[in-house]
């Protein structure tokens, strides 16, 4: 029930209430907001007017102070926002602070501290191994023991809609030729899910797998843009560097972990059994249905529930050596790829290394991205009463070097 005019099938229903940062018209001020239906609630304005105890966390134009406040405060704010949006007595007071989504500009919702990217889809790891190493390539020997990841570049995490300039660098693709320098000719996307850390941790103290929800505030979508011809040449023997660091796009709305209660599922069976620090009693598989569109054409529907390692295991792993967490840390799942052909979350896989161009509706084909191409990743998850929770899109267009 709500006094709002809210469509039953809205991706931003009352079970969702994702957080973002917006500005209005040409105004420079950035405001923390909560998306609901076709609107965003100007949260600092509402909190100030209602003299809410958490109003002081909302005035900085980024989510970080709210993230740092911890799970008890996150729940308090969420419950209060729900009450404002459902109790008719608040309709006038709160209604005055609803801004149409069509009138806003989204900004990066939080100041990114560290950025880590994992590699946790078994099918993606198998495909990448075969494409780059030959058809009989196997999973790396460590893959089912270690949730593989690398540290990326926090400063180039950008909000959805930010154009992506085709990166230049040292390229190597054709095995018969040597390296060359110039704009990437193998520019790719990776459809991923990102986890936003709220509560930090002390250096030297690992975060147990069971403490995931004490630290992680919410979930967004990530496009880990990847220049394959740079990546493959430079990643010998270390991990991704300039092939990834030029841009990472995130969706503008952070879906609170509490909104994903109905999306939780057991993860796929793990064999061999992981080390004890990676074993948790609670299921943290998430049944998110991703969709990847290239110039408006649906090219892939990756299922997040197939991920081998969960976000709770990834968090335990990235702190098990004593590395600390900071408010605003972002870690991404790795490319989400399912077992079926239409479930591949990268163009590397969709075109099988560029050897099998895939079709967009209308007869056009692609291997990797061309200048002007726009990629949009979207997702939804089960909510209550058969409804779906929607994620904001992460979109980006390639502009020439
Ligand atoms: Mn990635």
Image (cartoon, rainbow, N blue to C red):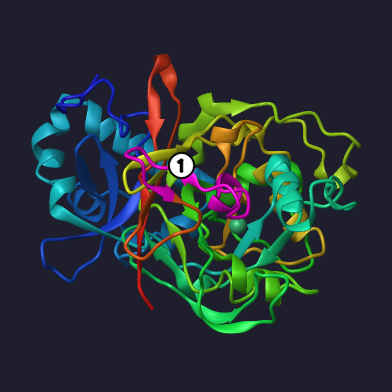
Tell me the quarter of the image containing the C terminus. Answer: bottom left
Helix, strand or loop at label 1? It is strand
Q: Position of residue 107 (x, y in %)?
A: 31, 62
| Between 229 and 94, the one nearer to me in the picture | 229
The span picked out in magenta is 346-365
| Between 384 and 43, the one nearer to me in the picture | 384
> Quadrant holding ligand 1?
bottom right
Q: Position of residue 298 (x, y in %)?
A: 40, 38
SS assignment for the magenta stretch, majority: loop
Q: Is residue 397 left or right of residue 219?
A: left
Tell me the quarter of the image containing the N terminus. Answer: top left
| Between 334 and 20, the one nearer to me in the picture | 334
Residue 369 vertical placement versus 18 (above, below): below
Report if residue 350 lies within the magenta region: yes
Q: Position of residue 117 (x, y in %)?
A: 63, 59
Outermost residue, top side: 385
| Label 1 CB sits under 8 Å from any ligand 1 atom | no
Outermost residue, bottom side: 181
| Image quadrant where residue 113 sits | bottom right
Q: Which residue is mark 1?
A: 256
């Amino acid at each position: 029930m709500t006094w709002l005019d809210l469509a039953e099938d809205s991706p931003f229903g009352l079970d969702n209430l994702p957080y973002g940062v917006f500005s209005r018209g040409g105004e420079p001020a950035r405001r923390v907001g909560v998306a609901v239906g076709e609107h965003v609630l100007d949260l600092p304005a509402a909190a100030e007017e209602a003299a809410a105890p958490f109003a002081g966390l909302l005035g900085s134009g980024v989510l970080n102070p709210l993230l740092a406040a911890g799970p008890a405060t996150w729940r308090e704010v969420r419950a209060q926002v729900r009450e404002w949006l459902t109790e008719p007595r608040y309709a006038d007071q709160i209604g005055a602070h609803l801004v149409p989504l069509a009138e806003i500009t989204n900004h990066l919702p939080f100041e990114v501290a560290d950025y880590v990217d994992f590699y946790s889809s078994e099918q993606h790891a198998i495909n990448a191994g075969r494409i780059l190493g030959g058809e009989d390539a196997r999973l790396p020997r460590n893959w089912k023991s270690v949730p593989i990841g690398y540290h990326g570049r926090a400063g180039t995490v950008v909000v959805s809609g930010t154009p992506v300039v085709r990166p230049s660098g040292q390229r190597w693709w054709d095995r018969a030729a040597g390296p060359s320098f110039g704009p990437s000719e193998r520019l790719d996307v990776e459809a991923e899910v990102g986890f936003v850390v709220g509560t930090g941790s002390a250096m030297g103290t690992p975060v147990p797998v069971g403490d995931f929800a004490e630290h992680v505030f919410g979930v967004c979508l990530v496009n880990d843009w990847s220049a394959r011809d740079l990546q493959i040449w430079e990643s010998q023997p270390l991990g991704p560097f300039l092939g990834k660091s030029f841009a990472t796009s995130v969706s503008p709305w952070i879906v609170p972990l509490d909104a994903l209660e109905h999306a939780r599922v057991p993860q796929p069976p793990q064999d061999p059994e992981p080390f004890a620090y990676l074993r948790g009693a609670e299921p943290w598989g998430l049944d998110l249905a991703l969709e990847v569109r290239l110039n408006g054409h649906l090219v892939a529907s990756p299922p997040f529930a197939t991920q081998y390692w969960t976000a709770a295991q990834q968090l335990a792993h990235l702190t098990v050596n004593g590395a600390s967490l900071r408010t605003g840390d972002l870690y991404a799942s790795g490319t989400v790829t399912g077992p079926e052909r239409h479930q591949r979350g990268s163009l590397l896989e969709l075109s099988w290394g560029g050897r099998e161009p895939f079709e967009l509706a209308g007869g056009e084909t692609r291997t990797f991205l061309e200048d002007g191409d726009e990629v949009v990743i979207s997702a939804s998850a089960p909510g209550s009463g058969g409804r779906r929770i929607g994620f904001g899109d992460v979109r980006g267009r390639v502009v020439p070097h």
